[in-house]
Every structure is written in structure tokens, then in C-alpha cells.
Image (cartoon, rainbow, N blue to C red):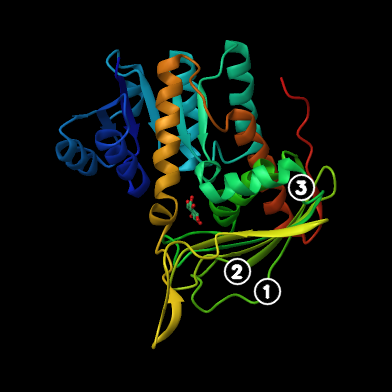
Amino acid sequence: RQVRVAVLGVGMMGQDHARRLATLTVGAELVAVSDVDVARTDAVAAEFGVRAIHDPKAAIADPEVDALVIATPGFTHEELVLLALEAGKPVLCEKPLTTSPETSRRIVEKEAELGRPLVQVGFMRRFDTGYQQLRSLIESGEYGAPLFLHCAHRNATTPPNFSSEQLMLDSVVHEVDSVRFLTGEEIVAVRVIAPRSTTAAPEGLLDPQFVIMETESGVLVDVEIFVNTTFGYEVRTELVAEKGQARIGLHEGIVTQSAAGWGGSITKDFKERFGAAYDLEFQRWIDAVRAGTNVDGPGVWDGYAAAAVCAAGVESLKTGQRVEVDLGARP
Ligand code: ISE
């Protein structure tokens, strides 16, 4: 049977997901969209020939909706995810799960009370071939223990009013999850420092920043987060292990050589760079919902751990100190 899905939040990402569900994901049927912007909801609903449900709570409660994609802004996630949990409906929630460890913890506890997984978190990099290959390499032990991960995460531009806090919660959160995915370890401490800002950074945003993370076993991670490079989207990771090194994300797509020289192209945004990863993420999620397991990928604990590390990062940026992360017991 087809899973009838409603997409809550049809901004840039939600529209992309609506299209994915309507045209690509096997076993899914897009049945409704919902957004605080009424005109936008109506336009997207008309585009896909589905229902516009203006109140997201009504969409969650709707008997003709089996599962939900939440792609609204992060600060709205807690309430919507908790309502979906109460309704017993599977959710694919875009990252971040919520904007604080306290609120994410509530979701972890609520799901534990229900006794079955219902929420998958949209850390799509876990479905990217490069990240999967790097994880397999680390897991195989062939290169010995990992020592460093050097990461660069660059965007061409940011949405208006993007703050230094959002830089941590919306952008660095991906590196946090990637490190946890690649190493299979929790992050125990964070320190954030920043050079002078680029003149392209909007008022109020420190950009770029440099984030240093330590894992349980002592892997040291550095992240250059730079979101106003003005020209393209690039996410790369270099592993330095005891007996070998590996890089992912350096060149996506074709590399050319001609009289003009050699080179390649740079993806313009994350929809392009991670398009295939999103497609796979959605297919695996819908397959899991149909199988009754609901989650096939990162879950609420991953969302919570990421929120805790990001909160420590925000604190470190303010105080300049190394901030330890204490996740507490996993229910
Ligand atoms: C955005 O929200 C994302 O999730 C992208 O993957 C990330 O690269 C970007 O910095 C965020 O703003």
C-alpha cells in the first residue's frame, strides 16, 4: 500500500521534498502540503494537485495522512514532532531535530515511552556515497585508528538574517552528525574560534568560523565553516589515520583537460550536491514505513546528540572556552 504523506513547510527544501515524493519515491503518495504562508501552500498544492491544509496540526491529525515530512524552520520542530508522536505517525524531520538539547531530549523521551521508533532525522549526508565509503574504510580498520578529520563546509551565500547561532544549528550540525556517523563515537568537547569575517558576511554573522571537536577516543576534528564564499557549494572531509589518509568531496562530477587547462565544475547548492543522497534517504524512509520499522537512518538520539554539541558550540563562540558535552544516559 502507498504511504500517504503530507509535507509541512514548503519553502525551498519542503518543495524539493514534495517534488521528490510526488515524482520519485516508490511507494509514497504526496497527499497534502502545509505552510504558514497561505499563498505559498495553495500554489504548491496546485502545482502537485494535492490538498492544501493550512494548519499543520490539522495535517498531522488528518486520517488520510499516514506519515509526515517536517521541513518547517527548526524552532517549530519540537511541537510538530511531539504531536506526530502522539498521533503515532512516522516522521521524517529535517535537521535540526530541534534547536536545543532540552527540547530534543523531550522527543527522545517521548519516543522511548511509546516504545517504538517513529522519527527519522534528515541528516542526508549519511546517504551520500562518499560518506558511506569513508565510514566503511574507517570501520574496516585497514588504515588503523583515525587521528584527525579535517572538514570544510562552504556555501555560496546564506539566507537573509542568518545568525552565528544558526550557523552552528543549521550548518555545523551536519559536520557534527557526519563525525558521529564516520567514527561511531560521541563528541565530548567543542571549541569555536573565528578569524576576521569576510566582507561578504551579512551584518551580525561571524563568517567564517573554525570549530574544533574531540571524540570519546580522542579523534581531533577541525571544521572550516564558511557560508558566504560567493560562488559555490563544497563539502569536503579528509581523514588522517595511523596508516593512511583519505579524502571525500573534492571533485563532484566531471574533471576536464583541454588546451584551456584542466578543471571541473562546482555544485551550486546543497540540493544539487546532495540530490542523490536525498533521493535515497526518502526511498529508504518510505520503505521502512511500509515495513513497519519506520526509521532507516539517523533517529532521535542522533538529533539530540547533535543538538547538544551545537549548543556547546554556541556557548564556546560566546565565551571563547572549550566546552564539554554531557549527553546523560540514553533511555
Ligand atoms: C542548510 O540548512 C543545510 O542544511 C545545508 O546542508 C548546509 O550546507 C547549509 O549551510 C545550511 O544552511
- The alpha-carbon separation of the residues under discs 3 and 1 comes to 36 Å
Q: Secondary structure at mark 3?
A: loop
Label 1: which secondary element: loop
Q: Which mark is residue 195?
A: 1
Residue 213 visible in the current orientation: yes
Q: Judging from the image, what secondary structure is the residue with disc 2 in?
A: loop
Q: Amino acid at mark 1?
A: Pro
Which is in the foreground here, disc 2 or disc 3? 3
The spot of residue 265 in percent (x, y) is 41, 70
Residue 234 lies, in percent from the top left, at: 51, 63
> Which kind of residue does numbered mark 3 sit on?
Glu
Viewport quadrant of the C terminus: top right
- Of the pair 75 and 292, the residue shown nearer to us: 292
Left/right placement of residue 10 relative to residue 74 reads left
Reading the image, the residue beneath label 3 is: 142
CB of mark 1 within 8 Å of CB of mark 2? yes
**Picture coordinates of residue 94 (x, y %)?**
47, 39
Q: Residue at x 25, y 37 (%)?
A: 23
Mark 2 Cα-neighbour bin, 10 Å: few <14, some 14–19, many ≥20: many
Please say if 308 is above or below 232.
above
Mark on residue 221?
A: none
What residue would you read off at disc 2? Answer: 208
Q: Amino acid at mark 2?
A: Pro
